[in-house]
Amino acid sequence: MIEITGLSKAFGRVQAVAGLTLSAGDGQITGLIGPNGAGKSTTFRVAFGLIRPDAGRVAVDGHDMVSDRIEAQRRIGALPDVRGLYPRLTAREHIRYFGNLHGLSGPGLETRIDRLVELLEMEGFADRRARGFSRGQELKVALGRALVHEPANLILDEPTNGLDVVSTRAVRRLLRGMRDAGHCILLSSHLMAEVGVLCDRLAVIDRGRVVASGTPGELRAWTGCDDLEEVFMEALARAGAGGKEPCR
């Protein structure tokens, strides 16, 4: 479980996150959606433990990301917005390296790597160096790194951005399977069709705070809109963000 409470983070005069509160439960896929600049990536970077909040708290299975960061990070698989591959390492070496960082080694680790290569359909480039990888190939490697230690919780920033249709469907199957096995998954996406087919709960974020949250059905009922894109725009309109006129 991932709990974010009263989270705030500023960069100089820019208030990126402003008192955001959000809970993502086990056995669920929770989607964080919002316009560009709403604070999604900053929220995720704090939740990953990459930057410290100015105020508030992130807890992963009850472990505070500031005071108990190592234990909290052990319980998270993170896919940040910047993939950060080492150009001289192969896809398989990337995943092995991150497995080593989590204390894994030997035949058990190699079995996990082989399974991820198959699940993410990386057979054609698993032993190639990362220099020259396509965006979709980079994303698959980054996903493999995030999953190698079989974390109970996942935080994924745009997990299918850059993938073709076949690969996107494979990733969605993988995420659904992890949800059904009891994992907590928190993801962001700009694709309303994707959050519609994946997410059990949604949180709409604007100007660093959650302005609407609930199941897709609850948000449709609240806004009076059937289409999730219209639900999203209506939530922004009600938050005073200059969205479109309310649905009738």
Image (cartoon, rainbow, N blue to C red):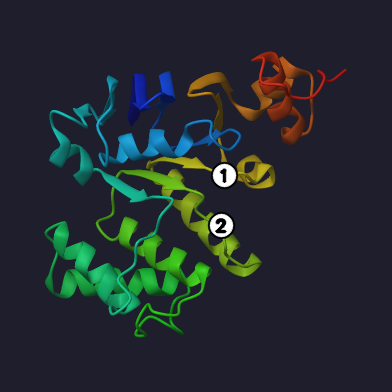
Which secondary structure, mark 1? loop
Relative vertical location of residue 223 with respect to residue 89 in this rendering, above or below: above
Q: Position of residue 164 (x, y in %)?
A: 62, 68
Q: Position of residue 98 (x, y in %)?
A: 22, 63
| Amino acid beneath label 1 | Ser
Determine whether label 2 and label 1 are within 8 Å by CB: yes
Location of residue 170 by image quarter: bottom right
The one nearer the camera, 244 or 47, is 244
Residue on which the image places disc 1: 189
Query: Mark 1 or mark 2, which is nearer the start of the sequence?
Result: 2
Residue at 64% in and 29% down = 216
Location of residue 248 by image quarter: top right
Q: Position of residue 247 (x, y in %)?
A: 83, 20
Left or right: residue 66 compared with residue 116: left
Q: Position of residue 157 (x, y in %)?
A: 46, 47
Relative vertical location of residue 75 with respect to residue 144 in this rendering, above or below: above
Residue at 36% in and 27% down = 12
Relative vertical location of residue 53 with respect to residue 78 in this rendering, above or below: above
Residue at 68% in and 26% down = 217
Residue on which the image places disc 2: 161
